[in-house]
Amino acid sequence: MTTERDMFDQGDLVAVQTTQPLDRTLDYRAPEGGCVLGDFVEVPLGPRKVLGVVWGPGRGDFDRSKIRPVTRVLDVAPMREELRHFLTRAAEYTLTPMPAMLRLATRAPGLGDPPSMRKIYRKGGGAPDRMTDARRRVLEVLEEYGGLAFTLHELSEMAGVTTSVIKGLVKQGAVREEDSPRDLPFPTMDPSLSGKELTEDQAAAAAVLRDHLRSGRYGTTLLKGVTGSGKTEVYMEAVAECLAMGKQALVLLPEIALTAGFITRVEARFGARPAEWHSGVTVTERRRIWRMIGQGGAQVVVGARSALFLPFRELGLIIVDEEHDSSYKQEDGVLYNARDMAVLRAAGAGARVVLASATPSLESWANAEAGKYDRLDLKARFGVAVLPEMRAIDMRAEKLQPSTWISPTLRQAVRARLEKGEQSLLFLNRRGYAPVTICRACGHQIGCDHCDARMVEHRFQNRLICHQCGETKPMPTVCPSCGVEGKLAPVGPGIERLAEETAAAFPEARLAVLSSDLFGSARALKEKIEEIAAGAADIVIGTQLVAKGHNFPLLTLVGVIDADLGLQGSDLRAAEHTFQLMRQVAGRAGRAELPGLALLQTFQPDHPVIRAILSGDEEGFWRAEAAERQAAGVPPYGRMAGIVISGTDLAAVFDLGNTLARNDGALRAIGAQVFGPAPAPIARVRGRHRIRLLIKAAKGAPLQEAISRWLAPLRLKGDLRLAVDIDPQSFL
């Protein structure tokens, strides 16, 4: 409720937080008609007009005659105190400037546009007299987006056709042209519709979540359930309770590829499509969603991590599905972990959080152990499905031909599935054909011109690609170092090379390759996944994309080509990530009536992580991993921050790093240690040299405050850049 203090009459001084890179709010005069705290406004800044939010009363600490008035108040719901508080807390936690946080919360174009009508296009009831490729693409786009409307420009771009193709389809009734207000509420969802029948285990967990919601208090619940146990159906009951209470729910998913299937399930459960928020959503829909959430015209949002910054009017529930997934960590721009920010947002809104996973992050497991989070367990698969049997293939005892990676034991298991008409999945978490291309004449390894990274051969595209900066070049025929022709050779397997070997070993089998770089759109990937689920492939070859949430009823065998891959390197989370990935990918097998088997090819069958995966003793693994981390004083039992300094001049980059390392008094004052500077594992990206410093502190240490004091005297010169990463997930 707006109080007198929150209202500003015409001419009153107001402090406006803008999205521009400034270190403070700016004073303006309230416009004609006044404004209220949280209003979105357009203000003059030099010769430009920029977006801002009324953040409070102005300071008035300089010549008032020079203070300009707010240009106008935008016709959108004011930013609520809860969201302003969340942005402030998130900025303090991640050491991010407020303008950057505000940009995250205003990522919808045209917020200041006045309400108006426009032409929109939907699928019509007729059919064209003649079907062409261009017409088919238009109809496929409309079909894919389930009745959503497009502007003429958006539809022509997404279908890759001219606008005349669409207008021709309008004349024939295959596409409808309508006049529509720019922003309409989403259809009302019905929480009283019955969902799937729950098992006793699921019903008990759902009842607990409903009780938590009815309490009206903040809290976080870890919902841990084995793969295929029906976690989604359980938390869908919590969403139903949230809707019945008249509140909004947010469901975060780690991958856009999972969104389409999940939205179909939500629509089936509640009778209407939810709002969808991610990078693949059209500009028109982004603007509509942003406005409707603020007005309460969208009840459920399904989206990527950035959906956390939407202006919910009455947020009651946040679901973080596959909460352990590393893609919840934003690694560029504003560095934040969506799982942690979800907890922070819910705490400020008095909402509930459900963290769902078959293999939780050690952070969430430890919080549940410490009693900070509630914990619910689903220990059995839904229906008749049972967990797959898991076995190791000791590669030291296997006889492999040169340049092959599928062991005789695994080949035999795949052959047995082919004979029974069942599906197999061969898993290798490495995109492309080969990770290294070497010259057998001089030993040169082809690297990126702009990064200290080897270029990866992608034979399907006949190109070399840098997985750091995206640089590509045609596959050379001669060595770029010595000029000798015909001596370039691939080293090591990528998924494309594995597909080549599989095709040679099983020529009669239908193969499907699932890798994010092989699909131009989320729609194409969704279609391929649906085809596989319907039985259109005998052998699926996939990267970690296949480990997340997909359900293939005919899949009974999972073969992991290199179970040791994630155990290499110095990442403190290597064991945890390997354990999670192996358990998740093995969980794709035997999800229906047919029993499943997971075979892990390993040269280290006695490694503690491999043993834990095979034994299924998940609690034992977490306890052992927790004890190691606790002894080392690292997260979640200690605190860490990464500092990355980059620039085109290597000497200047190291000088800055050494200066910081020498002047670490502010950090030593809280008992923190600084390690480095040292070259980052990938020491040059896009032509910029990169060094890292790592800060380690005790669990309760005021780390952000100390880092702020440490960096306060710093003045970056030239093109030097410094990024602070609180709770780093990646050490590249």
Image (cartoon, rainbow, N blue to C red):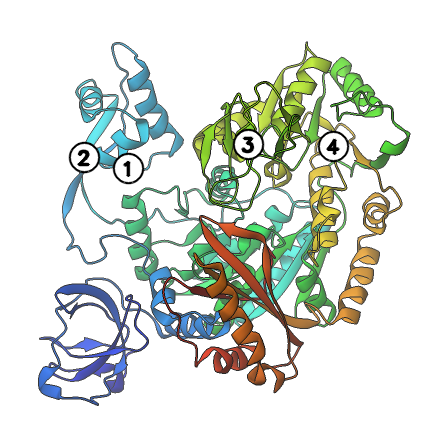
N-terminal of the two: label 1 or label 4?
A: 1
Q: Position of residue 306 (x, y in %)?
A: 43, 55
The residue at the point 64 percent across, 58 percent down is 207
In the rendered image, is residue 227 in sight? no
Q: What number is the disc on residue 533?
A: none
Residue 561 is marked as: 4
Which of the two labelled residues, at mark 1 and mark 2, occupies the earlier sequence position?
Answer: 1
Q: Which residue is mark 3?
A: 481
Check disc 1 and give the amino acid type. Answer: Ala
- For mark 1, give the secondary structure: loop
Residue 27: % across, % down:
20, 80
Depth check, mark 3 against mark 1: the one in front is 3
**Residue 531 percent location from the top left of the image:** 55, 23
Judge left or right: residue 160 versus residue 269: left
Name the residue tied to disc 2: 178
CA gap between label 2 and label 4 equals 53 Å
The residue to which callout 1 is attached is 149
Q: Position of residue 349 (x, y in %)?
A: 46, 71
Residue at mark 2 to residue at mark 3: CA–CA distance:
61 Å
Secondary structure at numbered mark 3: loop
Whether tag 1 and tag 2 are in contact, CB under 8 A, the answer is yes
Q: Is residue 217 above or below residue 208?
A: below
Camera-near label (2 vs 4) is 4
SS of the residue under disc 2: strand
Q: Amino acid at mark 4?
A: Ile
Q: Is residue 265 visible?
A: yes
Q: What amino acid does circle 3 point to?
A: Ser
- The label nearer to you, 2 versus 3, is 3
Which of these two is toward me, 141 or 627?
627
Q: Which quarter of the figure has residue 424?
A: top right
Q: Earlier in the sequence, mark 3 or mark 1?
A: 1
Number of numbered discs overlaid on the protein picture: 4
